[in-house]
Image (cartoon, rainbow, N blue to C red):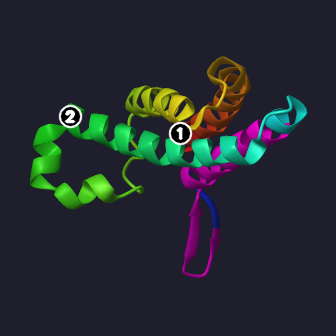
Amino acid sequence: MHPVLLKIGPLTIHTYGFMMALGVAMGLWFIYAQAKRAGLDANRIMDAAFYTIIVSLIGAKLLLFVGNISYYLEYPGELLSLARSGGVFQGGLTFGVIFALWYFRRKKIPTWKTADLIGPALALGHGFGRIGCFSA
């Protein structure tokens, strides 16, 4: 595998982190472009995506903690580290979907039309993340 993508002096760019960031960026780009094309308020949907990403990261870390509770009780600082693990995908997906549905309803964003845009973007972002995971 190829865990280090680039190393310039003291700066090390890890493949996993780079691919995760690229996946998020590509997913957001896709959502923005498709929302504009569908005649939706792209800025409101990007706000929803931003907050959903934050909640998803929290959910991913929470499920990571629950799955390895004895380790993280002994080394709590490791839970905040992105170097060890970004979290558990299923936790991020579950928390993200629940939050997004709540947020769409609260902000009166058309849920199913927006979900149709988010599905392919989520798959795109997850694909980049998996490539990074395989490279780590």
Q: Position of residue 134 (x, y in %)?
A: 56, 36
Q: Position of residue 97 (x, y in %)?
A: 48, 27
- Seen in the picture, residue 98 relative to 23 is either above or below; the reply is above
Q: Nearer the viewer, residue 116 or 6?
A: 116
Instruction: Indicate the amino acid at tag 1.
Output: Cys
Residue at 26 percent of width and 56 percent of height: 78
**Span colored in magenta:** 7-33
Q: Residue furthest right?
A: 37
Q: Is residue 19 magenta?
A: yes
Q: Nearer the viewer, residue 72 or 52?
A: 52
- State the quadrant of the N terminus: top right
Q: Which residue is mark 2?
A: 66
Residue 133 is tagged as 1
Residue at 10 percent of width and 41 percent of height: 70
Task: Tell me if residue 1 can be seen.
Answer: no
- Residue 104 as seen in the image, left or right of residue 33: left
Quadrant for residue 77, please give it. Answer: bottom left
Q: Position of residue 127 (x, y in %)?
A: 65, 31
